[in-house]
Image (cartoon, grey):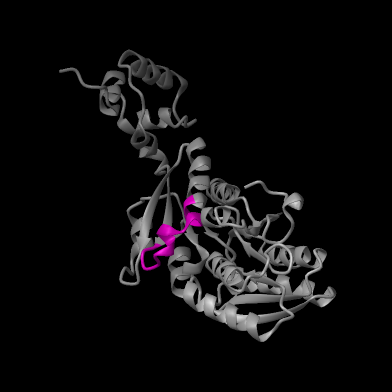
């Protein structure tokens, strides 16, 4: 049975080493013109099509990028945000001939980055900023592999990252409520040290300083629907001036929506709800929720481009890129005829 030609067959036909064939495949200038012609003729005669392994023989490139995910964090697998970011990453990498390999980081696995570097399993690394700490950062820098974080990191780390402009997102939310004459906002904070939450709160407070609109802040557990429902209900019952709820989490927004139904507020007039990110559950809610949204596919694409730039140029300058969010107005904050987003 006839089998496809291999790089070894080409080397034998051309009477050269495998390394020379690989140099021709990778278009290295160190190969003599006459030798290159012989190798190319051998490839044509044998109908040899170089695969990625052959291309990597001399260049030592894997044509793979590693995406590190936290296996101890369930949201890394069930959150639509992460899925869309990954899709954006893969679209850009595929056009450049790279594939994306996913590696799980666990608290029990201490040597993941070292193995990636030592076994030459990837040319670069992408990881979510929430995973970064001093020890993990030390391993990344020691590996010598270029890496970019998905999401803004603490300033002390001084690494490359791409994120949404969460400060601007916070500003957009309050400005919208102010323009629509809401007087007092209930803001549901998430008790965490995540940079994106910190930036959103900073943006919210910046606009509050300059607008004739008041706010009350309450701390909620992240993604806990029952906790959010009870605390939002209590806050509204205690303060009749509250006429809008601004939530940092979609779960909290849906809890506020349940409260609004229970207390018979008329959403879009006396009682408004606005949140961040248009996940499918938010778009399908009734009434549909106004959101400060971001093109998550674009975020993934920019992350991939940033890493490719570092891999190709090995630039030492820090790259901190922010994707501009947009306001998607739906019926939870305005009358139906004033909506700007159909979906």
Task: Please give left or right for residue 92 compared with residue 323 in the image.
Answer: left
Q: Who's the residue at 61% across and 75% down the image? A: 188
Residues in magenta? 70-83
Q: Please say if 154 is above or below 92.
A: below
**Residue placed most toward the observer, 300 or 22:** 300
**Quarter holding residue 32:** top left
Q: Is residue 324 visible?
A: no
In percent of width and height, residue 313 lies at 58, 48
**Residue placed most toward the observer, 319 or 19:** 319
Task: Please give left or right for residue 30 compared with residue 337 in the image.
Answer: left
Q: Residue furthest left?
A: 1
Task: Please give left or right for residue 28 compared with residue 48 in the image.
Answer: right
In percent of width and height, residue 126 lies at 48, 56
| Residue 26 inside the magenta-drawn segment | no
**Quarter holding residue 136:** bottom left
Q: Residue furthest top?
A: 45
Q: Who's the residue at 50% across and 68% down the image? A: 130
**Quarter holding residue 139:** bottom left
Q: Who's the residue at 53% across and 80% down the image? A: 230
Q: Is residue 12 visible?
A: yes
Quadrant placement of the N terminus: top left
**Residue placed most toward the observer, 99 or 290:** 290
In percent of width and height, residue 122 lies at 40, 50
Q: Please say if 136 is above or below 313.
A: below
Q: Who's the residue at 81% across and 68% down the image? A: 181
Q: Please say if 94 is above or below 303.
A: above
């Amino acid at each position: 049975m006839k089998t496809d030609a291999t790089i070894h067959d080409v080397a034998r036909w051309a009477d050269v080493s495998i390394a020379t064939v690989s140099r021709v495949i990778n278009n290295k200038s160190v190969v003599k013109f006459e030798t290159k012609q012989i190798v190319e003729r051998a490839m044509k005669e044998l109908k040899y099509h170089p695969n990625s392994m052959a291309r990597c023989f001399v260049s030592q490139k894997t044509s793979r990028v590693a995406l590190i995910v936290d296996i101890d964090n369930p949201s890394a697998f069930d959150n639509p945000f992460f899925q869309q970011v990954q899709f954006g990453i893969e679209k850009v990498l595929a056009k450049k001939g790279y594939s994306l390999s996913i590696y799980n980081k666990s608290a029990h696995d201490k040597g993941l980055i070292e193995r990636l570097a030592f076994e030459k399993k990837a040319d670069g690394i992408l990881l979510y900023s929430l995973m970064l700490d001093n020890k993990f950062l030390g391993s990344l820098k020691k590996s010598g592999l270029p890496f970019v974080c998905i999401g803004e990191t603490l300033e002390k780390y001084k690494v490359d990252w791409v994120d949404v402009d969460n400060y601007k997102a916070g500003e957009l939310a309050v400005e919208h409520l102010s323009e629509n004459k809401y007087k007092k906002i209930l803001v549901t904070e998430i008790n965490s040290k995540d940079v994106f939450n910190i930036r959103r709160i900073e943006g919210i407070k910046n606009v509050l300083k300059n607008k004739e609109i008041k706010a009350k802040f309450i701390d909620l557990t992240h993604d806990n629907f029952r906790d959010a429902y009870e605390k939002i209900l209590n806050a509204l019952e205690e303060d009749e001036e509250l006429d809008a709820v601004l939530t940092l989490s979609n779960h909290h927004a849906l809890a506020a929506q349940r409260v609004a139904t229970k207390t018979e507020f008329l959403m879009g007039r006396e009682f408004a709800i606005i949140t961040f990110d248009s996940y499918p559950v938010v778009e399908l809610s009734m009434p549909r929720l106004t959101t400060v949204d971001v093109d998550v596919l674009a975020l993934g694409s920019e992350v991939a481009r940033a890493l490719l730039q570092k891999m190709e140029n090995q630039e030492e300058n820090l790259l901190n890129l922010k994707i501009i969010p947009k306001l998607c107005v739906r019926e939870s904050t305005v009358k139906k005829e004033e909506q700007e987003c159909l979906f």
